[in-house]
Amino acid sequence: MRRSLLLSFLLTTLVWISAIAQDRQVTGKVVSAEDGSSLPGVSIQVKGTARGTQTDASGNYSLNVPNSGATLVFSFIGTTTQEIAVGNRSTIDVKLANDTRALNEVVVVGYGTQQRRDLTGSQLTVKGDDIARLPVQTFETALQGRTPGVQITQGSGRLGSALQIRVRGAASISAGNEPLYVLDGIPITSQDVNTTDTELFSPLADIDPNDIESIEILKDASASSIYGSRASNGVVLITTKRGKAGRTNVQIGYYTGITNATRKKQFLNAAEYKELFSESLTNAGIDPNDPQDGFPGYGIDPNSTFDSDWAGVAFRQGAVNQANFGINGGNEKTRFSLTGATNKQVGFIVGNNFRRNNMRLNVDHSISNKFSVGASIAFSSINNKKVSGDNAFSNPIQLNALSPLQPIYNPSDPTGYNRGTLYYNNLVELDNAYNYARTFRTFGNLFGQYQLVPGLTFRSEYGFDILNLQEEIYRGRLTEDGAPTGYGYQAMNRVNNWTTNNTLTYLKNIGTDHSVDVLAGITYQEQNVQTVSATGRNFPNDKFKELASASQKTDASSFETGYSILSYLARANYKYKDRYLLTLTGRVDGSSRFGADNRYGFFPSASVGWILNEEAFIKNTLPALSLLKLRASYGVTGNSEIDNFASRGLYGTINYGDQVGIRPSQVANAALRWEKSTQLDVGLEFGFRNNRINGQIDFYNKITDDLLLNVPQPAINGFTNIFQNIGSMRNRGVEFSITSQNLIGALRWSTNFNISFNRNKVTRLDVSPIRANSRFLSYVTEGQPLGIFYGKKYVGVNPQNGDAQYEGADGQPTSDYASAPEMFVGNPNPDFTGGLNNTFSYKGFDLSFLLQFVYGNDLFNVAGIYQSVNGNYFDNQTKDQMNRWQKPGDITNVPRAEFDAANGSGLSSRWMEDGSFLRLKTVSLGYNLPSSLLKKAFIQSARVYVSGLNLLTFTKYTGYDPEVNTQYVNTTNQVANIALGHDFYTPPQARTFTFGVNLGF
């Protein structure tokens, strides 16, 4: 046996030595074609093999190559890749030119691809590499600050919480305002289906950001109308990574880090609390030590020696860890990509944890030159240990309301916590309750593509998205909601989406001047949603937590709903002399959601483009101009995101004792029709010096008619509401972005800047003005922006007596709250948003940072009614309330402290603040290890890096975080659309620091 092993070893060694002997060394230098400077870190690969190296700090390289037939591939970020046959040469020097392919790169469009240069619509691209390097749970977070015309708000710091995305402004009052998401050609579920609270969690968290090749956001009618009735809010096309012919690449990545709150609010300490509330009680004629009305009457000991930091115990240092891998490769016949990852996060909010595991396989196979097939399958599981929503007493952020004079812990209590507090001490729930949301999701699609005749291709694909959400809550008998015998809730939610697309594509060049690209197709999508839930009480003890152990099954429910949509679509692109462009698009949608009289809708668009730099009169006079394209588009898109049966007459059950009957529950409206958005867009794209400086500017005007609203009806007819088309809204704005490669030598520096302006206005409303609810300032009325703040205007404090003052009907201050009129006091919609991104690289090092900014929006802190109200009740107060009025002549904005006197506690603009902010969103510093070190370990590439997320925030807002929108508003689509810019015990964003490594083999 030993002889056999020795012989095998000797033969292997001889073969290896023989192979080495057949190699020869090639050396050379790589420089920039622009200025001749050396380029360090250039990748040099022997084509079709795993053999390669990188240039050193002086741009030099050395590589052993096969003795014959070798081709070297030179690639470097921001330059054009070159392939050079070695031949008999031993020295090969290379000049890499600036990459102008952005002008001609192929981008994904609806149901196809197109050269970016030939686009006549407005769409933007975000590369997957820009997303994968960031420690984010969902890819939408990585888009913040990078996408002109797209406002992305992460309204809460809870793990897995949904983001609010608005493409060119909100376009609806009652229907959905989120864009349509399309994953590898298949529309997917993007709405949360949880049944436990109004806190929305993102179904898009099931998509691993590392799997994404690119994201395209379709903004104007020309780009998006191919999606017809679902495109009014924009369309997001997500393309995942696929295999490429060549050597097999293996990539492994890992990062670990810590998270903290971006900001913690400052509340009164024990001494300040006692001082303020003693004064407040005294001013109200109450002895602070009165056993009934004073401190003791509320369970607070004024002589307590405790100084509890209740606001601080809601937070902790969190942790984040992720490991991922990717394997891709293949040959000319079969290509594959296999990826997987596991992500675990311990939230900075106590009790909040998140874990995701996912895997994806993409396979493409060319059966012949005419026939190709492909398949994708992805699995994802998420276990999200949730914390309660903003409006719940069990929300850890609401601990800040408790008195610092009361202790946090009580060793003699069975929970270990003090349960005799002013409000519920929800820390009890850390060990005595749980709230899990477990998601199991599968994405898949299968396609076949066949070239019928030259230029004419038929493609058929079938896709599915299966989402299963399991919710499980248990609250023990020692908790507030679980007392006295325990409470349990379980729900199973299943959402099935099935889609089939069948298209014909015809490409033809006619002579040298004409080119046509025609698409026609039919698609069908069906969604089915099923939910089963049950509640139980009276468990034997807290060891038994399944509903089967509850003696009382107090509630059970189930429902099923769904919709279907049948579509016919067509698009024609025409190009003349490579510079005159025309695109015509049309789609007919038939949806089960709309009335019998308007079941089908037609959504057309037209756009033109003129590549002016191809004209002789410009080419000759402005040779530095690499692109100047003028484009314009006009078209119609729709919004179908309403209830599945909004147009139908419905019946429901009614119970009386043990008897059951049926009754009408919704009146039919056969005339119910789509919301339609008509959009005009004019854009100019430009590039200079081989696209070294490039950018674009867009002007748009989007008018949405036939706004859908659940209109209140007189109860005398037996119905309280009916869905109707009742008004119009306009969004008008400007978008600008510019990218420059400032330095392109050994030190490379590129900058991207974008800024967007949008003005929203409700132009017609055929009903009375709409309020979100009694706690919010949000308002909808004709002639004003959506969600404008409307209420009594707070103007300060009367310096003579300390009374709160409001603007009266005559414009003068008044202390009579009831007589003060309501008026427009603020606007939650920003004046402009944008971002500034800088990327540097030098000798293997790379550094990038992104600044995100929002300016001109107002925020309303609803919690101020309780926590910043000059000691009106025993809720702990923010530090600024110590600056209250105390004697005649005091100049302050904080009224006289007087317990339960409602001095300044009425709903008003008192708690409205400027929500503008500038945020250092991301920073990443990395180093690519030299190839000379890696070859010894058989590693192709290695990068180590540190990164940060939400590192610094500059703002005048005094709340936890200026990027906020309380999830408390999400009771209905209408309230969520209207109640913008409100804060209510909403946790801040996470500040994250990570260290990671990426290896390539």
Image (cartoon, rainbow, N blue to C red):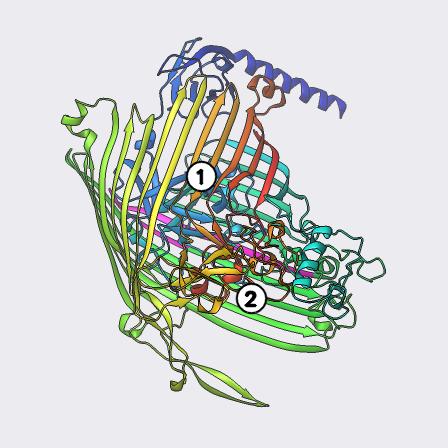
Q: Which mark is residue 880?
A: none
Q: Main secondary structure of the magenta part?
A: strand
- Residue 77: % across, % down: 43, 26
Q: Residue at x 35, y 57 (%)?
A: 785
SS class, disc 2 = loop
- Neighbourhood count class around disc 1 (C-alpha, 10 Å): few under 14, some 14–19, many 20 upward: some
- The relative height of residue 899 versus residue 461 in the rendered view (above or below) is below
Residue 242 shows in this picture: no
Residue 447 within the segment the image draws in magenta: yes
User: Nearer the N terminus, badge 1 or badge 2?
Assistant: 2
* Cα–Cα gap, marks 1 and 2: 44 Å
Query: Which of the 4 image quarters holds residue 10?
Result: top right
Q: Residue at x 70, y 74 (%)?
A: 537
Above or below 447: residue 664: below
- Location of the N terminus by quadrant is top right
**What is the x, y in percent for residue 491?**
60, 67
Asked whether, in this view, residue 738 is left or right of residue 628, the answer is right
Q: Is residue 408 toward the left or the right of residue 85 in the image? A: right
Above or below 259: residue 996? above
**SS category of the residue bearing label 1:** strand
Q: Nearer the viewer, residue 799 or 686?
A: 799
- Image quadrant containing the C terminus: top right
Q: Which residues are magenta?
A: 434-462
| Relative depth, front residue between 176 and 700 | 700
Of the numbered discs in the image, which one, if any, rests on residue 195? 2
Mark 1 and 2 residues: CB-CB less than 8 Å, in contact?
A: no
The amino acid on which the numbered mark 1 sits, given as a three-letter code, is Thr
> In this view, which residue lies farthest toward the right?
412
x 57%, y 71%: residue: 532
Q: Which residue is mark 1?
A: 334
Q: Amino acid at mark 2?
A: Thr
